[in-house]
Image (cartoon, rainbow, N blue to C red):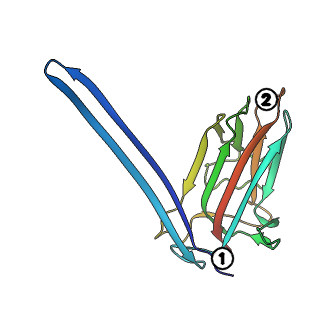
Amino acid sequence: MGLSSSISVSASAELTSTLDLGTASAPLNLRRAVSLASGTGAGKADKVFSDRRTLAASASEDLDLAGVLLDAFGGSITFARIKGLIISAADGNSNNVIVGGASSNGFVSWVGGATHTVTVRPGGTLALMAGGADATGYAVTAGTADLLHIANSGGSTSVTYDVVLIGASA
């Protein structure tokens, strides 16, 4: 089964200021994209997982990146490397979605340590991508560093989030 994928992020803005005889502007356009061919080396990925998930108030879950997740066709996924990670919190959430900080066996190569987390606010998105020339990406080690921890920051309402993981099996 082949996989072709593309991950991108872009930002555009224009700062303007009214002057005596005109308007000055400073436009900004930034786009970064990674296209990945099918495979396991540099610039390649062969596994993808995506899902919309809901966590009850104060709940958390660990997504096991090595052998427990299923792809769109029901096949087991074992990531060895993550090349793209996207977590998007629903607009209607009242609480934040907290990513990272697994108490044990945490997939933390992307965040720096077991107690480190990233807060994704309602309507917000966390996007992480490894460059196309990068064969390593973010390492997953089955049994010791393979749990992506996701938590609901509050105790009053549930949160919904979308997750996309793109990576390689070797």
Is 83 placed above or below 31 here? below
At x 23%, y 21%, the residue is 18
State how far apart marks 1 and 2 are (Cα).
Answer: 37 Å
**Residue named by callout 1:** 170
At x 33%, y 35%, the residue is 14
Which tag, 1 or 2, sits closer to the chain's start? 2
User: In this view, which residue lies farthest toward the bottom?
Assistant: 1
Is 111 placed above or below 145 here? above
Please, what is the three-letter code of the amino acid marked with disc 1? Ala
In terms of secondary structure, where does tag 1 sit?
A: loop
Compared across the picture, whether 41 is left or right of 62 comes to left
Q: Nearer the viewer, residue 38 or 92?
A: 92
Q: Nearer the viewer, residue 25 or 170?
A: 25
User: In this view, which residue lies farthest toward the left?
Assistant: 21
**Residue named by callout 2:** 154
User: In this view, which residue lies farthest toward the top?
Assistant: 20
Percent from the top left, x then y, of residue 138? 60, 61
> Crowdedness of circle 1 by 10 Å Cα count: few (<14), some, many (20+)?
some
Percent from the top left, x then y, of residue 47? 68, 71
Quadrant holding the N terminus:
bottom right
Percent from the top left, x then y, of residue 75? 81, 74
In terms of secondary structure, where does tag 2 sit?
A: loop
Quadrant holding the C terminus:
bottom right
Is 82 placed above or below 54 here? below
